[in-house]
Image (cartoon, grey):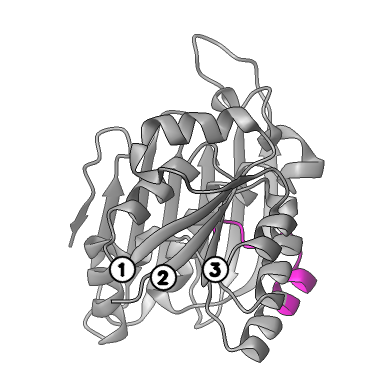
Amino acid sequence: MEKIRMGFIGCGGNATGHIGRALEMPEVRVAALCDVNSASIARVKERYPALGEAPVFADYQKMLAQVELDAVEISTPHTLHFEQIMASLDRGLHVLTEKPMVCTSAHARAAIEKSRAAGKILMVAYQRHLAPQFRYVRNQIMAGELGKIQFISALQDQNWYLGTLGTWRQQLSLSGGGQLNDSGSHLLDILLWMTGLEVEEVQALMARGVVQQGMVPKVQACVAALRADVRKTHIIDAAIPHAMLLEIFTQQGIGTEIIHDAAAQTPAARR
């Protein structure tokens, strides 16, 4: 079987997980690694001896030019995604990119248009689309088993502020936004994907507080009116320990509750 030759643009942080999973796939060969930080490449090579003599680069453009690839995975600071996506599609490669795909709607439209013109897959790593509890609820909604959606409450608790202090994730030029643009986008994505609804109106606020006993009372909140006559949807991202809670109430008065405790890795769907 001919293997898919995959290159990695960015080898730090969560890229190590992507690389490890790629190495477990018999149909994939990790063909090249790229990171501006040589220490990141050294760590990932030490962690995964199976990478062997895979060539390494500090410049992703050189990797694209010098290595024959079929696909790339992009796991770099957010504002770099657009340029890297477009360059990879120009080379005729499939692209898996970390979230957020890009940081402006204009860039999103341009990237989607280019992927369609190139006939290549452009996919964002929103892994909850493949998680059984979220797929189950989506299927129930799409089949009409829960009736018309009336109200949604979504909560994501995460120690994001303290966990990203001093990193590029809190530098606007690299992150392109705050927590809601970062891991908070997972909550927005899965809510819209499960329900099939679209945002029609948005209001937002951000409250800042003082760090006390390892907790940060900092909240970004978004109250969005969705199409299909949903009364109100609350989306709140708080800088407290990992957890996700979604509650969907329908015309039939049924509440579907999805809880995902990232620390304990105990997702569940209840109806």
In the rendered view, does 266 fall on the left or right side of 103? Answer: left
Q: Is residue 167 above or below residue 247?
A: above
Task: Find the distance from the CA under tag 3 to the CA under tag 1.
Answer: 14 Å
In the rendered view, does 260 fall on the left or right side of 94? Answer: left
Magenta run includes residue 107 = yes
User: Residue type at mark 3?
Assistant: Leu
What residue appears at the point 28 percent right and 60 percent down from the top-left corner? Answer: 25
- Is residue 119 something that shows in the picture? yes
Q: Is residue 192 above or below residue 80?
A: below
Report which residue position mark 2 lands on: 4
In the rendered view, does 33 fall on the left or right side of 252? Answer: right
Report which residue position mark 1 lands on: 27
Mark 3 packing: few (<14 Cα in 10 Å), some, or many (20+)? many
Q: Position of residue 129 (x, y in %)?
A: 36, 67
Task: Find the distance from the CA under tag 3 to the CA under tag 2.
Answer: 8 Å
User: Residue type at mark 2?
Assistant: Ile
What residue appears at the point 70 percent right and 61 percent down from the top-left corner? Answer: 84
User: Residue type at mark 1?
Assistant: Glu
